[in-house]
Amino acid sequence: MNAPILLIHGFPLDRRTWAAQAAALSASRRVLSPDLPGFGAAPADPAIRSMDDYARWLVGELDRQSVDRVSAAGHSMGGYVLLALHRVAPERLAGMALVSTRAAADGDDARQAREAVAQRAEREGAGFLAESMPAKLYGSTPTLAALDALRSIIRGASSAGTAAAARAMATRPDSRPQLPGIRVPTVVVAGRKDGVVPPSESEAMAAAIPGARLVWAERSGHLPMLEEPELVSESLASLP
Ligand code: MLT
């Protein structure tokens, strides 16, 4: 029997972005796909200020669900959280999938932009991200229904959760030194047309992790779990 799989969503999204994979994988293993604090149905948690805090919150979630070890998939910010989970509790991981994510930290410009997002979210809520973000995330023009669904997910993010996540991403450490120490089976999934995480960063990340497999989602931008759901489900199904 495979280990349960933990699906960690990106920013400013929620567990629904993993719906296709949760449905596909639930026939063969237990699936945990929590909303991170401040997103979807989960209330914000003022104690969360860093990626390591999200990771410790997830360890608490595993404990609450009586789950010892999981394979875990992290999309984008969820990948930052997954690398943090590997830092704080590597013994809880049986395998990893890093989806449309990166190991490097933010530069100064990105940090300033995050703070601007955090302050605007605190002033007016996360709604403005629902207008500005989605079109940039797809590799090809999404259907109106897909765009609406994504916008409604983003509108569900709380002000406090969005601000906390933006600041936690801004202050996340460079995880690249950690990559050669990853000892569990790992798959890196990258959208060939990703405008948020350049494909070259995914390539470098996969090359730095011993034995990692790199899977290209050829038609995808930053959302391969929505744009090429079967490919992503198959990639996750390969984890122990
Ligand atoms: C995400 O999809 O989680 C974010 O775009 C990640 C980021 O802004 O670095």
Image: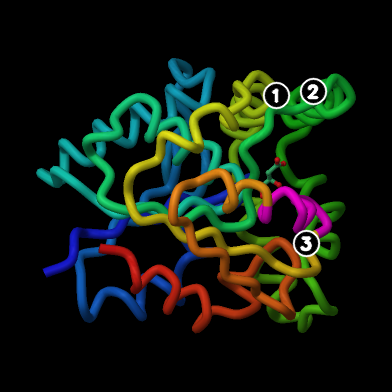
Residue type, label 2 = Arg
Q: Which residue is mark 3?
A: 194
Picture coordinates of residue 47 (x, y %)? 44, 16
Q: Specify start and end residues of the magenta stretch as a single range.
A: 195-203
Does label 2 point to a residue whose CB lies under 8 Å from ligand 1? no
Query: For numbered disc 2, what is the local secondary structure?
Result: helix
Q: Earlier in the sequence, mark 1 or mark 3?
A: 1
Whether residue 12 appears in this view of the structure is no
Given this view, does label 1 or label 3 mark the residue nearer the observer? 3
The quarter in which the C terminus is drawn is: bottom left
Residue type, label 1 = Ala
Residue type, label 3 = Asp
Q: Residue at x 53, y 21 (%)?
A: 50
Indicate the quadrant of ligand 1 in the picture.
top right
Q: Are marks 1 and 3 in contact (CB under 8 Å)?
A: no
Q: Residues within 10 Å of mark 2 (few under 14, many from 20)?
A: some
Q: Are marks 1 and 2 in contact (CB under 8 Å)?
A: yes
Residue 80 picture quarter: top right
How far apart, in angstroms, are the residues tagged by discs 1 and 2?
5 Å
Q: Which residue is mark 2?
A: 111
How far apart, in angstroms, are the residues tagged by discs 2 and 3?
20 Å
How far apart, in angstroms, are the residues tagged by discs 1 and 3?
20 Å
- Left or right, 16 with respect to 102, comes to left
Colouring: rainbow
Q: Is residue 219 above or below residue 7?
A: below
Q: Which residue is mark 1?
A: 170
